[in-house]
Image (cartoon, rainbow, N blue to C red):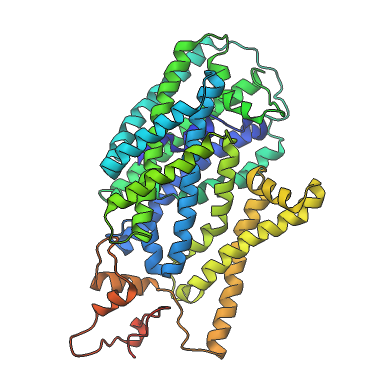
Amino acid sequence: MPTKLVEWAYPWACFTYAYQAGWVGLMVYSLSSGLPVLLIAFLGTFIRNKIPNIMSFSDYVLRRFGWPVQLWVSALMLLNMGISITAEYTAMGDYFAIILGSTRVPIVIVVGVLSSIYTAYGGLYVSIVTDQIQAVLSVVLILVMCIFVAVTFRKELPSPLPSNLSGDNYYGFASIAVLPISLASASVYSEALWQRCWAGASNRKLLIGASLASFFIIIAVFIFGFLGFLAIWSGLWTYDYEDPSTQSVILFDVLNVDGQKIWLLTLVGCLAVTMSTSLIDSYQNGIVDNISGVYLRGQNVLWTRALVLILNVPCIVTSLQGYNILNLFLLANLITTTSTLPVLAGLIKHPWAHRIVTPATMLFGCWLSFASLCIWSKAKAADWHLTTAQAIHKTFFENYDWPPFVLALGISVLGMAIMAVVENIFRTSLCKRFPRLAYSDERVKKLHEAHPLPVHLDLGVKEKLAHLDVPGKPAKLAPEDEIDLPHSPKLDQ
């Protein structure tokens, strides 16, 4: 887990939005980058205690909610990780196109092909090994930058702080809601992080590793972000409204303050390529795990790895368009925010949880949350002087502001509550035997303890239940152990 240090530090912090959020955003961003790693570790230990041999978050979703919710969660994970890979390719392209004045095509193709080949060959093991190399190189990069800036930076810093960097800053206060919500949601829907939980030797070692990772990530992101903050404060960089992509060079304006620091830019470029390649292979392994566990169960993993090679093509092509890094992450973060609380609600341990947190309530909460963002965008279209389509585009792809994130989070919970009332009224008054479509914590544990299944084994629910049958005699469970499923009769019938 500590080797994931640069996952958040690069490219987000290199291409910081310090020009908007100021020192408040810098502090909140640093904390919000590290704490989600600790959150995933705690959730991972909770799931491992419940289902010891689980190997993916989507597998847990299958056992808790069933296959319809698993498909939804899997789709969001693929979207989130695909956008993250695209952002990494874009970051590399920006560095070579803007900083070095080269073309972005060769480096993006080289990184994409190289990471895909060794990921397809070595899988998660190679990813972990490269993560360890990545961690060492990232420390080297941070030390070199800190020492160089401390020795050479002598620009005059105006006092007081400019308004866009001060504490009295709208986007700085907005980041208090935006960053924790967005980064936590992105973490939940990243199998690349969950894989580190399943690979942990023990829960204790996992939590120790996550704690160290969280601490070092906070420090690393603060350093990267502060360098961008310093560039704006000293006047080395100003926002170009006609070409927003120039924000990609904030960090390098500090490193190349007097020009011609070719050796330093070359070193940073080599290390950045290494770190991005290592991060891309983590996402690729997450995609392999997701696809093989949901869509290609029982198939040879080579088919999945071949599919990942194919899926890299649209990511590379999209990255060559030079989209803004923050805009790419905004799209992924906002969409995952609509479904974060509903899926995490399935982890609640309480007797009534399986009666309220069901597949129907979970999916309705997610979809209502997404719909609310579209409705909110339509309502704001007049104020923004945009058409409805343009307003939706701005909400999902341009405007990193707090209302959409808070709205998505709140409406997802409200949607679950509304659907829970409707569903329970329906059961009580119309159809008491209607299947609830969800496992309680006790049912998940009993099913796993009695019949542990190999990870990603292609067994449907009927085949799982068939193991409970005694030859010549139908299975019979106590009423409290009955399992209601959408595609299987109750066991006691």
**Is 62 drawn above or below residue 179 in the view shown?**
below
Residue drawn 45% across the image and 51% down it: 78
**Is 165 drawn above or below residue 175 in the view shown?**
above
Q: Quadrant of residue 376?
A: bottom right
The answer to whether residue 321 is left or right of residue 138 is right
Tag count: 0
Q: Give the x, y percent position of residue 3.
A: 35, 36
Q: Give the x, y percent position of residue 321.
A: 57, 35
Residue drawn 31% across the image and 52% down it: 303
The answer to whether residue 297 is left or right of residue 413 is left
Q: Give the x, y percent position of residue 162.
A: 72, 25
- In which quadrant is the C terminus drawn? bottom left
> Residue 167 or 109: which is nearer the viewer?
109
Q: Is there any visible trace of residue 380 in the rendered image?
A: yes
> Residue 347 or 294: which is nearer the viewer?
294
- In which quadrant is the N terminus drawn? top left
Outermost residue to the left: 471
The answer to whether residue 290 is left or right of residue 99 is left
> Residue 275 or 413: which is nearer the viewer?
275
Q: Is there any visible trace of residue 197 in the rendered image?
A: no
Residue drawn 28% across the image and 39% down it: 126
Q: Give the x, y percent position of residue 198.
A: 31, 52
Residue drawn 68% across the image and 26% down it: 239
Q: In which quarter of the image is residue 118?
A: top left
